[in-house]
Amino acid sequence: AQSVTQLDSQVPVFEEAPVELRCNYSSSVSVYLFWYVQYPNQGLQLLLKYLSGSTLVKGINGFEAEFNKSQTSFHLRKPSVHISDTAEYFCAVSVGTYKYIFGTGTRLKVLA
Amino acid sequence: DSGVTQTPKHLITATGQRVTLRCSPRSGDLSVYWYQQSLDQGLQFLIHYYNGEERAKGNILERFSAQQFPDLHSELNLSSLELGDSALYFCASSPQTSGGTGELFFGEGSRLTVL
């Protein structure tokens, strides 16, 4: 069975500092990978996705993620965060069926 | 605005009761997903419908059921409610016709509180 692990439940970081949110997945077959963001009192929205091709994927709001097949990871990065990036971030995996599995989320808190 | 509409936004009810949550997907989207979000469990996949047919089932309790109607809206029925059913229930839709590659568009959720 497929699974997604987000190793950090909370990540505090100062404004304009870089951040990395970690995501590891488990699957015996090829996967599609996603990062979603949830702002307070809102639904989730897509930040970026990896389907195939280049392992470095760029998304909205200056975020990017790198797919590493050997490490089964898909970590999310941003070189300089803003207060407005404070939100919960979810990594998700799909294995080509209609089933998307989400991680437990990482709360990013950007401090002034 | 994702284009996915969920009603009601908030619902407070008592244990043992039954509630229905409604979801209208984005115009043209055939796939509807239901997720349950709670503090201790994260975002749990419940069930997926495609064009009226159930396609995948996750950790959905037997007390819960769902359906997708010919106009593509979906309803999630929760019965014999327990305190532990208190959660945020999300609906998401997707336009994909091939599995697993498309973006999910989420509604703002229905917050259920069981007292």
Image (tube, rainbow, N blue to C red):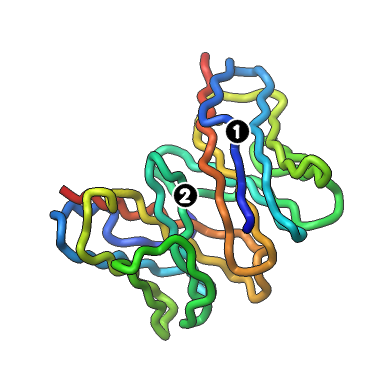
**Image height check: is B90 above or below A19?**
below
**Image height check: is B66 above or below A54?**
below
Identify the residue shown where x is 40% and y is 69%. B24
Residue at the bottom extreme of this rendering:
B70
In the image, what residue type sits under mark 1? Answer: Leu
Residue at the right extreme of this rendering:
A54
Q: Quadrant of residue A62?
A: top right
The disc numbered 2 marks a residue on which chain? Answer: B
Q: Does any portion of residue A84 appear in the rendered image? A: no
Q: Nearer the viewer, residue A91 or B64?
A: B64
Mark 2 to mark 1 CA distance (whole Å) = 15 Å
Q: Position of residue A50 (x, y in %)?
A: 74, 52
* Direction from residue A5 to residue B70 in the image, left or right: left
Q: Nearer the viewer, residue A65 or B107?
A: A65
Identify the residue shown where x is 32% and y is 55%. B110
**Image height check: is A47 above or below A13?**
below
User: Disc 1 marks which residue?
Assistant: A7
* Direction from residue A81 to residue B54 in the image, left or right: left
Q: Tally the numbered discs.
A: 2
* Direction from residue B14 to residue B19 in the image, left or right: right
User: How many neighbours does mark 1 have within 10 angstroms: few (below 14), some (14-19), or many (20 or more)?
Assistant: some
SS class, disc 1: loop
User: Disc 2 marks which residue?
Assistant: B43
Q: Position of residue A12 (x, y in %)?
A: 54, 20
SS class, disc 2: strand
In the image, what residue type sits under mark 2? Answer: Leu
Q: Position of residue A112 (x, y in %)?
A: 52, 14
Q: Nearer the viewer, residue B103 or A22?
A: A22
User: How many neighbours does mark 2 have within 10 angstroms: few (below 14), some (14-19), or many (20 or more)?
Assistant: many
Q: Position of residue B44 (x, y in %)?
A: 46, 53
Identify the residue shown where x is 59% and y is 70%. B95
